[in-house]
């Protein structure tokens, strides 16, 4: 199932306040059951991570990791991934392993 992008600021804030979260040294994940039954994914990387090149790399790594797990995600969730300072420095497989563990803990992957 292909997911759509989460773009609106109000949607991100709704996940931060109402969603369940899981964290590791590489990634923070917020999950909330969506209202319309489709999967939407947002990725953020703040200025603490570094300059634009590092932030973009962090987002690319997260996007690549999620593309591997996307088929296994149950439909109907809004998901936000927040990059951490280590995200841009590690391999995509390490982020994918953290992501899978967090999504499993949050009940999005069986």
Image (spheres, grey):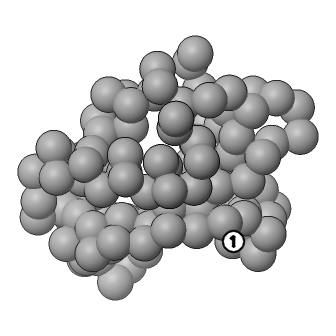
Q: Is residue 81 above or below residue 36?
A: below
* Residue at which label 1 appears: 16
Q: Is residue 11 left or right of residue 1?
A: right
Q: Is residue 24 above or below residue 104?
A: below
SS type, badge 1: helix
| Place of residue 5 in the rendered image (x, y in percent of width and height, measured from the top left) | 61, 36
Which of the two residues, 46 or 70, is positioned nearer the viewer here? 70
User: Residue at the location (68% across, 27% down)?
Assistant: 75
Q: Is residue 39 left or right of residue 44?
A: right
Which of the two residues, 109 or 68, is positioned nearer the viewer here? 109
Where residue 27 sits, quadrant-wise, is bottom left
Number of numbered discs on residues? 1
| Place of residue 18 in the rendered image (x, y in percent of width and height, measured from the top left) | 79, 69
User: Residue at the location (60% across, 48% down)?
Assistant: 107
| Place of residue 55 in the rendered image (x, y in percent of width and height, measured from the top left) | 30, 63
Res. 36 in view: yes
| Place of residue 34 in the rendered image (x, y in percent of width and height, measured from the top left) | 80, 42
Q: Is residue 28 left or right of residue 106?
A: left
User: Residue at the location (38% across, 37% down)?
Assistant: 66
Res. 4 in view: no
Which of the two residues, 12 or 29, is positioned nearer the viewer here? 29
Q: Is residue 104 above or below residue 28?
A: above
């Amino acid at each position: 199932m292909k997911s759509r992008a989460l773009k609106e600021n109000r949607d991100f804030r709704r996940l931060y306040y109402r969603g369940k979260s899981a964290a590791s040294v590489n990634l923070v994940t917020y999950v909330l059951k969506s209202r319309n039954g489709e999967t939407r994914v947002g990725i953020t990387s703040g200025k603490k991570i570094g300059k634009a090149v590092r932030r973009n790399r962090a987002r690319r790594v997260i996007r690549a990791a999620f593309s591997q797990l996307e088929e296994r995600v149950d439909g109907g969730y809004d998901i936000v991934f927040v990059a951490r300072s280590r995200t841009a420095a590690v391999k995509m497989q390490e982020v994918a392993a953290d992501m899978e563990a967090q999504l499993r803990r949050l009940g999005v992957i069986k």
